[in-house]
Image (cartoon, grey):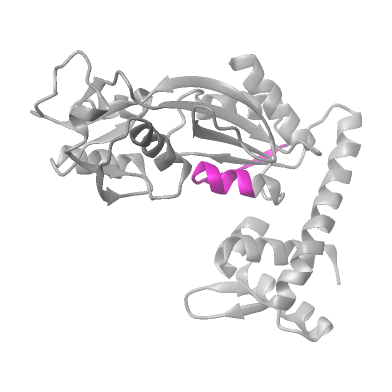
Amino acid sequence: MELQQLRYVVSLADTGSFTRAAERCHVTQSALSHQIAALERELGVRLFARTSRSVRATESGEALLRSARLAVRAADQAREDVAAVSGEVVGTLRLGIIPTVTAVDVPALLVTYRAAHPAARVELREGNSDSLVAAIRRGELDVALLGLREGMEPDGVASRPLSREPLVAVLPRGHDLAGARSASLSDLADSAFADFPAGTSGRAQSDAAFAAAGLRRDVAFESDTAASLIGLVAAGLAVTLLAPGVVRGFRDRVDTVLLRDGPVRVEHLAWDAAAPRSAARAFLDIVAAAS
């Protein structure tokens, strides 16, 4: 069993695809597949169940994966620690972001990061706040930019708030409330809503606000992306609640109105509290200088 084989196991488990795992590891698909098969022969077990559509770890694969992650992380940390002695940041920053980040300019931060640390690499992962926090806890991400409703804190990770922003009502053009100086949740309660999927932190912001106001609403449409929600609003099918910065690029398609009793979204910077890697510490420093 070799360290590189364990890297392949981790990448294959994370991506669920031989093609994407090979791309991440900068090898050919056949080379990665050969090494996984060789490891399975050595251990005498099947590590991954393969179908025409997906690849998933077997029970034996999951058992190996726990140790594989620790071994790969320890090796990476050792390399980074040696480089850090001379002040160099190496390795890969694994950064998670929600698609609706507005508190910071992510591309600008990465320009600064790469200029300061050219030997470092960056892996970006988009997702909802809950999945990103879970990925940090599992050691799959180093840092994440999150959006949570006011009063909520990321669980099991270190964090600090970056911004606090009241959500606005996003309305189809020509809506009765379009052009109003402000509105209340009760003004919208009879409308069909588009929102993020139930159970996600993005959805919780609006759900909690309507529950606190003693109002029920009809969420007729669900989507993982703000762009899709805005598209549904622009088509006249629904209304939604979003952060103003998220809607800024769509002002030619929809109207917005301030809410007197609407929810507030707080964006957070979150990271591994136990052992932040040097690549992560360097990124945290750049965010701190910019915010």
Residue displayed at 86% across by 51% down: 75
Q: Relative to residue 72, is residue 124 drawn left or right? A: left
Q: Quadrant of residue 247?
A: top left
Which residue does the image show at 74% across and 35% down from the upper left? Answer: 279
- Of 135 and 182, the residue lying toward us: 182
Q: Position of residue 148 (x, y in %)?
A: 50, 33
* Residue 9, horizontal then vertical, whole percent: 71, 67
Q: Residue, x 8% and y 28% (percent of image)? A: 174
285 drawn magenta? no
Would you identify the image quadrant in which residue 252 lies?
top left
Pick out the residue farthest to the front: 214
Q: Quadrant of residue 185?
A: top left
Q: Residue at x 53, y 41 (%)?
A: 129
> Residue 240, image x and y in percent?
27, 36
> Relative to residue 138, is residue 58 depicted above or below?
below
In the rendered picture of this protein, how many numbered marks are placed on residues?
0
Q: Pick the residue in front: 4 or 288.
A: 288
Name the spot of residue 98 as percent of width and height, x first. 49, 39
Work out which quarter of the rendered image holds the N terminus and state it: bottom right
Please give the range of residues in magenta.
120-134
Q: Is residue 95 left or right of residue 38?
A: left
Please, which residue is most extreme toward the top here? 181
129 magenta-colored = yes
277 lies above or below 105? below
Instruction: Tell me if 206 is positioned left or right of 79 in this view.
Output: left
Give left or right: position of 261 versus 82.
Answer: left
* Image position of 2 with respect to 225: above or below: below
Q: Is residue 146 above or below residue 223?
A: above
Quarter the C terminus occupies: top right
Q: In terms of depth relative to the viewer, which is nearer, 72 or 171?
A: 171
